[in-house]
Amino acid sequence: MQEEKVQTEQTKVKEGASVGAPIYRVTYHLRILEEKEETHTHHNNIMDRLSRMLAAAQGMGGGGGMQQDGNVVDNSETVYISSLALLKMLRHGRAGVPMEVMGLMLGEFVDDYTVRVVDVFAMPQSGTGVSVEAVDPVFQTKMMDMLRQTGRPETVVGWYHSHPGFGCWLSSVDINTQQSFEQLTPRAVAVVIDPIQSVKGKVVIDAFRLINPQTLMLGQEPRQTTSNVGHLNKPSIQALIHGLNRHYYSIAVGYLKGRGGQGHGTSTAGESSNGQVGGEEAMLMNLHKSVWTEALTMPDFKAEGDRTLEKLNKLVSLAEGYEKRVKEETELSKDQLRTRYVGKVDPKKHIETLGQDLLEDNIVSVSRQMIDKEASVPSACRIEAVDDEADGMAVDQTA
């Protein structure tokens, strides 16, 4: 009897446990869902507050909030650089290799789409880096006063610096320098030029301006698109790594040259208001112009003799190689000759070219020496020599 009672009680406990287990699980899951919903609601409230704070901050800062329209920079904005300014930047950057150099750009903001740079001047500095400390306000003031006296009333529209050999982008120090310029002039431009990668006909140059971090936090575009004028340089991987399109954006660059020249990759630039662009074409044409006196310039005799001796030694070695090839051709078959000298130097062709160059150089050198000798002898001496020669001929005829 007692064993039957124990079994009956155990059966009741098992039945109760089997009934209570689903209820406990449902209650537990409901509690977890309630906690997740409370956490999600709390996060949503925080994000709403943050969005309202950012919108209010933008409205206080002059942005006008999300509901108001304001002046937004356009992506068709172009920086037109005159030929004189570009030439000065290249010469300054090339003279400073391997150091970075910097300077200020003078010009004007024509409208919302055009920035014109007419001249630049270098800033004195020391060290390998370019920072805001390199801008000497005393030197800048004196330089601006002197330029104003020479007919340069333009103001500072930005700054430039060089990256010798490592492309066009802005480092963290450059970003801080650009921030200081934009605090004074919101539309200030930072131009980066690479004098090492620049070659004749292709200048490695780019212009940048910082992106307002508030626009990125609000998910807005830093610039508006209203036209397809101009084009941007294809960004390099180094520039993208260093914050291009995240901390700063690129601006189209055009070049001004005489008579309303064409901007590089942009529309017609037109002449400047001060009329100085027209004279820049003549300046560029005379930059590497050959003068007729260059043909009469006497080179160093020792250097010329060394070059001639080097060419003669090379001519002897080529003659030996040609003699060796002629001997080999008599011993090889036709099939072997087809592939024997593929990709090798042809001594016969080089002998002809080198011999022709050697003859021309020596003939020109001797002609220069004779012309120089005739030009250096005074005319009185030549007249006396002619008179003496005439007297000698007269004596011979009398005899």
Image (tube, helix red, strand yellow):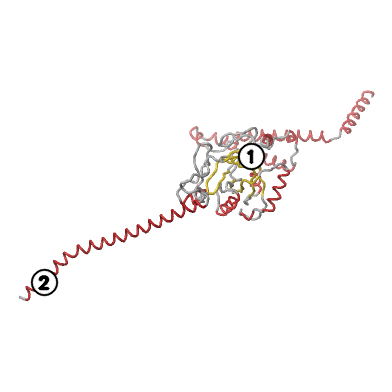
Between residues 60 and 225, which one lies in front from this camera angle?
60
Q: Indicate the quadrant where residue 13 lies.
A: bottom left
Tell me the kind of residue under disc 2: Glu
Secondary structure found at label 2? helix
> What residue is disc 1 on?
82
Count residues near mark 2 (Cα–Cα under 10 Å), then give few for <14, some for 14-19, many for 20+.
Answer: few
The quadrant of the rendering that contains the C terminus is top right
Give the residue displayed 33% in from the left and 60% down from the top.
Answer: 38
Can you name the residue that lies furthest to the bottom here?
2
> How far across and down, in percent of the image, does residue 324 sit?
58, 38
- Horizontally, residue 378 falls left or right of residue 29, namely right
> How far across and down, in percent of the image, does residue 352 sit?
63, 33
Between residues 154 and 65, which one lies in front from this camera angle?
65
Mark identifier at residue 9: 2
Can you name the residue that lies furthest to the right here?
398
Between residues 80 and 234, which one lies in front from this camera angle?
80
In this rendering, the label closer to the viewer, 1 or 2:
2
Q: Indicate the quadrant where residue 267 lies.
A: top right
Tell me the kind of residue under disc 1: Ser
- Horizontally, residue 25 falls left or right of residue 106, namely left
Sequence-first disc among 1 and 2: 2
Count residues near mark 1 (Cα–Cα under 10 Å), then give few for <14, some for 14-19, many for 20+.
Answer: many
